[in-house]
Image (spheres, rainbow, N blue to C red):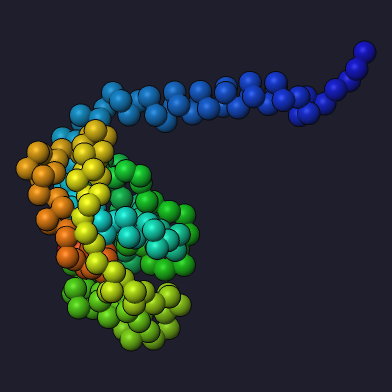
Amino acid sequence: MLNKDFTQSVFILIISTVIVASISFLVWVLPAFFYQDKLIAESSAKPLTALEVEGRDVYISEGCHTCHTMMVRPLDAEIKRYGRYSRESDDIYEFPNLWGSKRTGPDLTNLGRKYSDQWHAIHLNNPRDVVPTSIMPAYPWLFEQVLDGEDTEAKLKALRILGVPYNDKEIQQARLAVKGHTKAEALIAYLQSLGHEQGVQQ
């Protein structure tokens, strides 16, 4: 009789993976379907504007989410430094979520309106002009790249399918709302929206 190590069996590995994934789905995903309406009712989050959606895509494409978290834990030290702690209802329109796990830079959950648009522009162009010890890279090309808005309408349509309540007018006007703006302007618009939709002022 062969005494085969079960870790070398592809079949057992597949079955184990399916079981673990099924348990995770039942515990974490399925319950959300039953209290989604409650989350929407208690949330003060607002859908991003067309320009903010484009800014969020710039934020993702430039890898900003790899150095900045967007999840303040309910710990005194974090609340004192970053503001109100994150709630599940804050992220009902976030697809995908950008919680993150590494803080090379500060958490940005409640960043909105903490600094002016001009401060953000200087910071993006050369972070050391406003934070001398910053190790963040500069993003001067974002001020040269202009958005045409060709894909913005499709993005809003996709988000509406996922549950973001955009109306037909907002979708139809999305291209014009974005066209001619630089990627830097879009990114700044997105950064200024963070936390602001939950009424957080800093």
* Residue 29 x, y percent position in the rendering: 39, 29
Q: What residue is shown at x 19% (from left), y 66% (from top)? A: 181
Is residue 108 placed above or below 26 in the rendered structure?
Answer: below
Residue 190 seen:
no
Is residue 60 placed above or below 25 in the rendered structure?
Answer: below
Q: What residue is shown at x 36% (from left), y 62% (from top)? A: 107
Q: What residue is shown at x 27% (from left), y 74% (from top)? A: 143
* Residue 170 x, y percent position in the rendering: 10, 45
On-image quarter of the N terminus: top right
In the picture, measured across the screen, residue 23 lies left or right of residue 113, that is right
| Extreme-top residue of the structure | 1
In the picture, measured across the screen, residue 29 lies left or right of residue 149, that is right
Is residue 155 placed above or below 143 in the rendered structure?
Answer: above
In the picture, measured across the screen, residue 175 lies left or right of residue 12, that is left
Q: What residue is shown at x 46% (from left), y 67% (from top)? A: 104
Q: Which of 82/47 is in front?
A: 47
On-image quarter of the C terminus: bottom left
- The image quadrant of residue 80 is bottom left
* Residue 150 x, y percent position in the rendering: 22, 52
Residue 118 seen:
yes
* Residue 6 x, y percent position in the rendering: 78, 24
Is residue 156 placed above or below 59 in the rendered structure?
Answer: above
Q: Which of 173/138 is in front?
A: 173
In the picture, measured across the screen, residue 11 lies left or right of residue 170, that is right
